[in-house]
Amino acid sequence: MITLSGVHKGFGANKVLQGVDLTIAKGTSMVIIGGSGTGKSVTLKCILGLVTPDQGTITLDGQDVARAEREAFLARFGMLFQGGALFDSLKVWENVAFRLLRGALKRPKAEAREIAIEKLRRVGLKPEVGDLYPSELSGGMQKRVGLARAIAASPEIIFFDEPTTGLDPIMAGVINELIREIVVEMGATAMTITHDMSSVRAIADNVAMLHGGVIRWTGPVADMDATDDPYVQQFIHGRAVGPIESVR
Amino acid sequence: MSLLSPIAALGRVTLSGLAQVGRITLYAAATLAHLVRPPFYPREFLSALLNVGWLSLPVVGLTALFTGGALALQIYAGGQRFSAEAVVPQIVAIGMVRELGPVLVGLMIAARVTSSIAAEIATMKVTEQIDALVTLSTHPMKYLTVPRVLAGFLTVPLLVGVGDIIGILGGFTVATGQLGFNKASYIQNTVDFLELPDVVSSLIKGAFFGFIATLVGCYHGMNSGRGAMGVGQATKNAVAMASILILAANFLLTSVLFGS
Ligand SMILES: Nc1ncnc2c1ncn2[C@@H]1O[C@H](COP(=O)(O)OP(=O)(O)OP(=O)(O)O)[C@@H](O)[C@H]1O
Ligand SMILES: [Mg+2]
């Protein structure tokens, strides 16, 4: 279980998070929605310790993440970055198998490669892609390689930062299904950021909406449509008019 | 107030320069601490050896060759003024080995290696690759900095050695081909004149310069600002800082090694 309580983070005068409270139960899928630039990516980075919160605490299974032993802590996580963040000096399969080629989870090269090719297949990429370099792939393909890398070592907790942006609708459907499978079959805990409402419905057990530096609304996905919160309503229906200012 | 502002500005620059040196010293200490603690990344180290050492050979060789040749011409012309043109072999040897070899190689490494390290790591930083490394349980310091700095420390002395020899060869070519020196006696004079401390000091300087050049590149890359502009700034600052630190270190090392 991951809990955030009173998390604040600002960059200079830009106060991004202003007291985020959120709980993600073990083995569930949480989807975070919210306008561009509201701090969704920053929230994930705070949990991983890539960004240090100015205030507030984040715990994993009751233990403060700031005090956790980094190595063991990070070994439980997988993360898909919004921009893919592939290592461009390594081949695609070496990117996917990164964790399996070094460190605590190290295994023989042939075996690591096999796992990488299998993960690539799961995100809809052919084995040949494994021998290319990231710069030779399209944006959507890079995104899927990033996803394959995030799940390669079968982590307990996986963060997906906009997994389906830049993908065609069919491929987006495949990825949504994959994320759902990972949660249901492997019992992983997932936190996904997405702007795509059909993804939200496909992936989420629970939904949280980030707005104005706080969690504006959170609840089971089934309650999302029925809520009378005007912010959520405006967001899920994509209306230009409403409490969320669209022109700043 | 306005009269004092240039002084205040100078003070600010000095302070920020000192703070910079302090931070890089801490960074160096952290690098050394990671250097001795596993895990190690041999593959990264090998590729750093290739990039820093082997692939720098052409640049280093050409720089040294032309400088050695020019040096021979200058010393001959200058020596003629007091009928001492015969000292060309000795002065070329000592000039190359003690001073020009290490400094020129150091500066060429700052231009070629520091810039590429800084740009590469800064790009990794702005594209979140460094964050990705961390989430994949890999310490960026161990994976990126340590292999490069170690490669610089070990290979730049070798490059300096090669540069020294090629520089002397450049002098030899010009002196024997153009200035009428006898080949055998030129070599004899060079070998007789050079002493072991000259050569050792050259290599020691190389090791320091290699350490500085790679460390400064990594430091500025890791601390790069955001976007393409951040990468440009990081690269520019890295090359400037590495060059200045190399020249400053050269002065300090020369005073320590030959001061007394
Ligand atoms: N390292 C940083 N330095 C300075 N500002 C930052 C940094 N990272 C994020 N920000 C700022 O924090 C705010 C939130 O950024 P974040 O990336 O979390 O947005 P987001 O909700 O993920 O948006 P999007 O949906 O567009 O990805 C933005 O205003 C951004 O400029
Ligand atoms: Mg984002």
Image: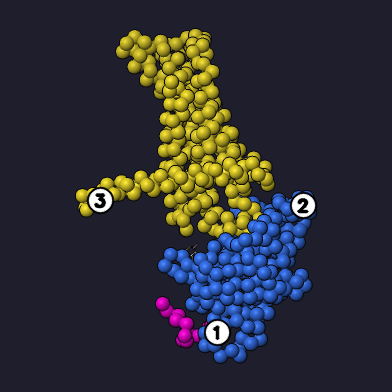
Check residue A244 for magenta coloring.
yes
Q: Which residue is mark 2?
A: A107
Q: Which residue is mark 3?
A: B5
Which chain letter goes with mark 1? A
Which chain letter goes with mark 2? A
Q: Colour of chain A?
A: blue
C-alpha span from label 2 to label 3: 62 Å
Which chain letter goes with mark 3? B
Region rendered in magenta: A234-248
Q: Are marks 1 and 3 in contact (CB under 8 Å)?
A: no
Q: Amino acid at mark 1?
A: Val
Residue at x 54%, y 43% (from the top left corner): B29
Q: Is residue B97 above or below residue B238?
A: above
C-alpha span from label 1 to label 3: 54 Å
Residue at x 41%, y 77% (from the top left corner): A248
Q: Which chain identifier belongs to the yellow chain?
A: B
Q: Main secondary structure of the magenta part?
A: loop
Respond yes or no on whether mark 2 lies under 8 Å from ligand 2: no
Relative depth, front residue between B26 and B144:
B26
The picture places residue A109, in percent across and down from the top left corner, at: 76, 50
Examine the rendering and report whether any part of residue B2 can be seen. Answer: yes
Q: Amino acid at mark 3?
A: Ser
Residue A232 circle label: 1
Residue at x 54%, y 18% (from the top left corner): B196
